[in-house]
Amino acid sequence: MEIVIARRFRGPAGSANGGYACGRLAAFVDGPAEVTLRLPPPLERPLRVEREGERLLLLDGDALVAEARPFEVEVEPPEPPPFDEARAAELPSGDLESPFPECFVCGHEREDGLRIFPGAWNDGVAATWTPSAELCAPELVWSALDCPGAYAAGAVGRGEPVLGRLAARVESLPRPGERCVVIGWPLGEDGRKLFPGTALFGEDRRLLGVARATWILPRT
């Protein structure tokens, strides 16, 4: 089995958005999954997927890029704000100081991205997302659950943090044009590791997906 991650789905300029890459590998797991990233996922070349017991390995030649396993995501999200309240909280033009302005999920320079721009809400962050038909896919739910966690955990503005692990459960897919709300909240930290929760809701507060992440700050 092989996958190729198109350059459109980049996070940093030279590698894939972490949530999208995790979602692509998680597609080979039956049910909720935890994906650990070992290397920045390369773009525009075949990556091999191999099964090793319950684990799925994503390989670039002999190099281990990521591994996935079945995982019960036991995260209870708080109640989301209404769509209009989330829109009022989000950054209207995105994070203009982001080190990743081309990120498929949160990059302010991407007209073809998700354009999810988390802003402060309660003890975490909130933003909106109204997906087109082409974006109503499981790996795009994983993507939407990615970057808001970095903002919720306080990783943004502290160098170039990287996603180390993402465990997610996709309950349902958004409908084309559905007015969705994504939230993130902090779950603690341990040294350079920061732990946020994220959740994506459709209209009528319908839970679409929930996740717990590990973000890693650069060494100082």
Image (cartoon, helix red, strand yellow):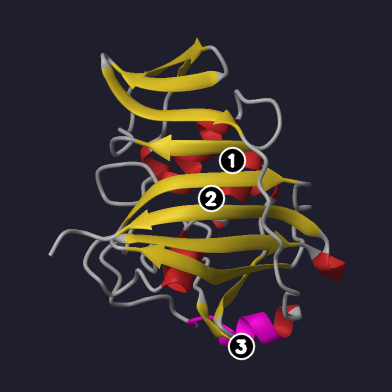
Q: Would you say 73 lies left or right of 120 here?
A: right
Magenta-tinted stretch: 85-91
Q: Which mark is residue 88?
A: 3
Near-viewer residue (175 or 57): 57
Q: Which mark is residue 143?
A: 2
Instruction: Tell me, yes or no, whether the highlighted magenta stretch contains residue 116.
Output: no
| Disc 1 residue type (three-letter) | Glu
**Is residue 197 placed above or below 20 in the rendered structure?**
below
Task: Please report the residue visible at 76 percent of the width from the left and 80 percent of the height from the top.
Answer: 82
- For residue 15, say whether it is visible: yes
Residue annotated with mark 1:
139
Residue 28: percent from left, percent from top: 60, 23
| Disc 2 residue type (three-letter) | Ser
Q: Would you say 60 lies left or right of 68 here?
A: left
Task: For label 1, count other residues whose C-alpha is less than 10 Å away and answer few (under 14), some (14-19) or many (20+).
Answer: many
- For residue 104, say whether it is visible: no
Residue 199 image-quadrant placement: bottom right
Task: Please report the residue visible at 39 percent of the width from the left and 74 percent of the height from the top.
Answer: 154
